[in-house]
Image (spheres, grey):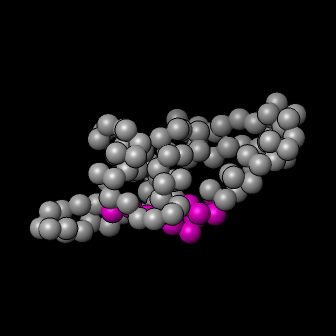
Amino acid sequence: MKGYQIQEAFCSKLRLQIISNLVSKKLLFTELKKLTNASDGNLSVQLKKLEGWEYIKSEKKLINGKGVTQYQITEIGIKQFEEYVVFLESVIADKNICECVFCTYES
């Protein structure tokens, strides 16, 4: 797997936390905030990035008369996360792979 490019979505600790928490269930913004200890602003920015890449989707809901936003991972997000996990497993198995791994960022 030489020259593997890690998707930008997985080059951020917060985005990894978001995705890994959404793999198992849908979560409200407030729940993600508690799980990640992120600020409202940073969490919002990262959620928008993940939505833009179609890794997650959001839904506005009313709970007890209050507007909330619920997030869930998409099929694309699941597929990309699974590929990332397979990549990490290969890194563990082949110590030399780290020489050729890099994150991709778009300006």
Q: Is residue 82 left or right of residue 97?
A: left
How many numbered marks, from 0 up?
0
Q: Quadrant of residue 68?
A: bottom left
- Answer left or right for 56 relative to 102: left
The residue range painted magenta reads 70-80
- Is 65 on the left or on the right of 59, as rendered? left
Residue pushed farthest left? 65
Is 69 situated above or below 35? below
**97 or 50, nearer to the observer:** 97
- Side of 64 relative to 36 (left or right): left
Residue located farthest toward the top when viewing the structure as drawn: 99
The residue depicted at 29 percent of the width and 41 percent of the height is 40
Residue 102 seen in this snapshot: yes
Say if residue 45 shows up in the picture: no
Q: Confirm whether the magenta stretch covers residue 99.
A: no
**Residue at image coords 79%, 33%:** 98
Q: Which residue is rendered at x = 47% and y = 41% of the image?
A: 14
The x, y position of residue 61, in whole percent, is 24, 68
Name the foreground residue: 90 vs 79: 90
Q: Which residue is located at x 79 percent, y 42 percent?
A: 91
Percent position (x, y) of residue 83? 70, 57
Q: Is residue 79 magenta?
A: yes
Task: Give the image location of residue 44, x and y in percent.
Answer: 34, 46
Q: How far from the left and from the top, in percent, is residue 78?
A: 59, 63
